[in-house]
């Protein structure tokens, strides 16, 4: 019985093989774009991203997985090595072939001993949902031999892959799945350019204080990876000068969240590596804070962010660059030396020179071997070395694919054709950031007027930092502005206390008043008096005095009266600039004793006059009597 079953199985296998041969002879060997794809086929590995057409023994091995995502079981599932012998000479043609919904016509190889064919199921079945792995291979000799659609042109790209044939339950032998990748036929390394961007969402203040530890953590993660990517031969690095200053401050004793911290050796080493790039003339400088220039232009703040702050002396004189999504008409021509436009093609020489950039555009989900092959093929076909913008860990990893088969060259404006940019939308303004900066500025001015000393508030730098391209959203930017702004104080924290009424005992009198400062900082204030009847009673202003934080000070109020009566006087606290603080204090001043004193003076003066006159009359009468007594004797 076992021998019988063995003979039956062998017979079925031979019959199946015969049927496949007969069907293969009657059907075209080309990959038919009209056949339905019942399988999901994924290439996971290719043994080499480049092929040498002059090396017949070189082997190209393709591995992958397939899954039956149909509802039919499939029999006699065979994976063939497939190739398109057409030499691809331009990226446009490559995109046309790989982006079409219709698979290009090509040819498959059949030699099972040479590994061209992988029979996955024999005479069994591939059930719905079942997954299988495959590997097929072919030699360069097979791909270049005459009479079999030879691949003969060097410095071109070719499409290779797999074509899967099978017999569904309800159909005949047909193509049920396919996958392809480009490979470059070249013996020379392909060229590209890379610009690594070193920037981070600000977690530090312009004065060197740190809000949290995020920058220190970044230096051992993302920023370390990016700097290492920038240290590769031929790569250019662009750094935010605000980040450079922050990491420099981190290398010295500093404060984090108000707590003292020692200098970081990691930060010190990171800065020295950046300095080495500058010494090698491979370092460019971004605008201070690396602001989003399109957003700044939309907010009317472009000039402000471009003047954000002076760079460190070690960065002075280095080439300047900015990264944008599209051209900015309002950008001054002499503001930057180079402008790099994301997701664009072409270039523009001049000032600034404009370079188009892209990303190594192979999805990270694609296995590295397949990504390398695709990347190299695209770079081989490019009219000029493409410029890759590297600003994430993922892009840095993608840019290292291919190893020695890829070399980096400095970016240039040699790209052919006019500049063409993607349809990127202009970033929306951040009105809440504008409001936060306006309020912070007003508060800083208030504190300056109140204390006589300007607080730490570097408006140009904070404006540039608040529009950093690294902030995830407007809320994060507003939170940064608020953290970087001086503490807000209410004018009600400074009060003037005085008696609500005062009766003068003389033309010039005095009475005390108290200035109370409940704020946590000393203030410099004076008192301005406004009399409703200054012709009757006036009060001299009190010059500014310094009142320590949390303390009170007594000042002397000096009214002067020129007439009797009651007068309301407003006492207003003012800053050194004369700006009012809080609500005025009402004081009623009464001058009543002034009338009594005046009448006394009049009476006394009249008595003096009357007395003098009486004495004069008496004297005259004495003189007259003396004269009369002397006349008879004569």
Image (cartoon, helix red, strand yellow):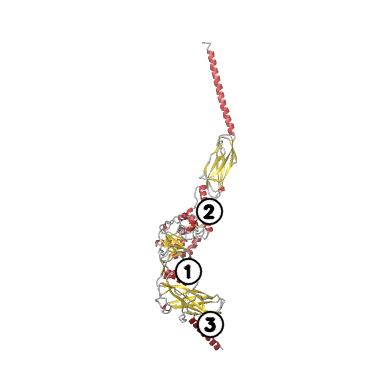
Q: Position of residue 305 (x, y in %)?
A: 47, 55
Residue at x 48%, y 65% (from the top left corner): 393
Label 1 element class: loop
Q: Position of residue 336 (x, y in %)?
A: 43, 58
Residue at x 56%, y 24% (from the top left corner): 610
Q: Is residue 495 left or right of residue 244?
A: right
Q: Position of residue 158 (x, y in %)?
A: 44, 73
Count neighbours of disc 3 (C-alpha within 10 A) and say few if under 14, some if 14 to 19, many if 20 or more.
some
Count neighbours of disc 1 (C-alpha within 10 A) and say few if under 14, some if 14 to 19, many if 20 or more.
some
- Mark 2 vs 1, N-terminal side: 1
Q: Is any atom of residue 151 visible in this view?
A: yes
- Mark 3 vs 1, N-terminal side: 3
Examine the rendered structure and indicate whether residue 535 appears above or below residue 493.
Answer: above
Q: What number is the disc on residue 207?
A: none
Q: Which residue is mark 3?
A: 123
Check if mark 3's residue and mark 1's residue have beta carbons within 8 Å: no
- Mark 3 vs 2, N-terminal side: 3
Label 3 element class: loop
59, 75: nearer the viewer: 75
Label 2 element class: helix
Q: Which residue is mark 1?
A: 362
Q: Which residue is mark 2?
A: 435
Residue at mark 2 to residue at mark 1: CA–CA distance: 41 Å
Residue 329: image quadrant is: bottom left
Residue 309: image quadrant is: bottom left
Q: Is any atom of residue 291 visible in this view?
A: no
Task: Classify the position of the N terminus by image quarter.
Answer: bottom right
Q: Is residue 419 left or right of residue 169?
A: left
244, 184: nearer the viewer: 184
Residue at mark 3 to residue at mark 2: CA–CA distance: 74 Å
């Amino acid at each position: 019985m076992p021998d019988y079953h063995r003979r039956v199985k062998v017979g079925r296998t031979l019959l199946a093989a015969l049927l496949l041969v007969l069907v293969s002879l009657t059907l075209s060997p080309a990959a038919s774009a009209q056949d339905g794809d019942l399988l999901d086929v994924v290439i996971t590995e290719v043994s080499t991203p480049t092929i040498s057409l002059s090396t017949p023994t070189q082997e190209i091995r393709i591995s992958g997985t397939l899954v039956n995502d149909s509802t039919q079981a499939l029999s006699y599932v065979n994976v063939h090595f497939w190739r398109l012998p057409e030499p691809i000479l331009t990226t446009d043609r490559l995109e046309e072939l790989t982006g079409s919904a219709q698979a290009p016509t090509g040819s498959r190889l059949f030699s099972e001993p040479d590994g061209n064919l992988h029979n996955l199921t024999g005479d069994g079945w591939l059930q719905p949902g079942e997954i299988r792995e495959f590997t097929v291979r072919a030699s360069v000799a097979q791909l270049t031999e005459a009479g079999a659609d030879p691949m003969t042109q060097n410095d071109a790209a070719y499409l290779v892959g797999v074509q899967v044939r099978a017999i569904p339950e309800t159909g005949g032998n047909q193509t049920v799945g396919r996958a392809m990748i480009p490979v470059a036929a070249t013996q020379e390394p392909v060229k590209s350019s890379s610009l690594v961007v070193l920037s981070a969402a600000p977690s530090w203040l312009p004065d060197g204080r740190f809000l949290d530890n995020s920058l220190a953590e970044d230096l051992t993660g993302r920023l370390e990876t990016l700097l290492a990517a920038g240290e590769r031969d031929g790569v250019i690095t662009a750094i935010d000068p605000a980040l450079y200053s922050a990491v420099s401050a981190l290398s010295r004793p500093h404060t984090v969240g108000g707590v003292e911290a020692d200098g970081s050796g990691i930060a010190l080493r990171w800065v020295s590596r950046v300095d080495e790039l500058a010494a090698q003339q491979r370092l460019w400088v971004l605008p201070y804070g690396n602001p989003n220039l399109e957003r700044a232009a939309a907010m009317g703040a472009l000039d402000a962010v471009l003047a954000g702050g002076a760079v460190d002396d070690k960065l002075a004189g280095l080439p300047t660059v900015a990264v944008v999504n599209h051209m900015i008409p309002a950008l001054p021509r002499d503001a930057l030396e180079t402008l790099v436009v994301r997701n664009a093609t072409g270039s523009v020489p001049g000032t600034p020179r404009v370079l188009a950039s892209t990303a190594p555009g192979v999805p990270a989900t694609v296995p590295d071997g397949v990504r390398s092959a695709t990347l190299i093929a695209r770079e081989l076909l490019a009219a000029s070395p493409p410029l890759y913008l590297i600003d994430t860990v993922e892009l840095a990893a993608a840019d290292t694919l291919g190893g020695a088969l890829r070399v980096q060259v400095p970016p240039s404006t040699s790209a052919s054709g006019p500049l063409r940019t993607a349809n990127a939308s202009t970033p929306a303004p951040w009105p809440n950031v504008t409001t936060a900066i306006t309020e912070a500025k007003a508060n800083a001015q208030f504190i300056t007027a109140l204390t006589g000393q300007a607080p730490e508030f570097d408006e140009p730098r904070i404006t540039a930092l608040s529009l950093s391209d690294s902030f995830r959203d407007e809320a994060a930017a507003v939170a940064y502005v608020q953290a970087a702004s001086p503490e807000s104080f209410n004018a009600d924290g400074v009060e003037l206390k005085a008696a609500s009424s005062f009766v003068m005992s003389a033309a010039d009198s005095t009475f005390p008043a108290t200035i109370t400062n409940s704020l946590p900082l000393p203030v410099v204030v004076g008192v301005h008096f406004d009399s409703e009847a200054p012709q009757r009673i006036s009060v001299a202003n009190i010059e500014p005095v310094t009142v320590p934080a949390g303390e009170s000070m007594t000042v002397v109020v000096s009214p002067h009266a020129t007439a009797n009566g009651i007068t309301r006087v407003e006492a207003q606290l003012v800053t050194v600039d004369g700006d009012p603080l809080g609500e005025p204090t009402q004081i009623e001043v009464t001058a009543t004793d002034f009338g009594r004193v005046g009448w006394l003076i009049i009476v006394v003066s009249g008595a003096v006059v009357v007395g003098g006159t009486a004495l004069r009359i008496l004297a005259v009468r004495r003189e007259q009597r003396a004269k009369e007594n002397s006349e008879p004797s004569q």
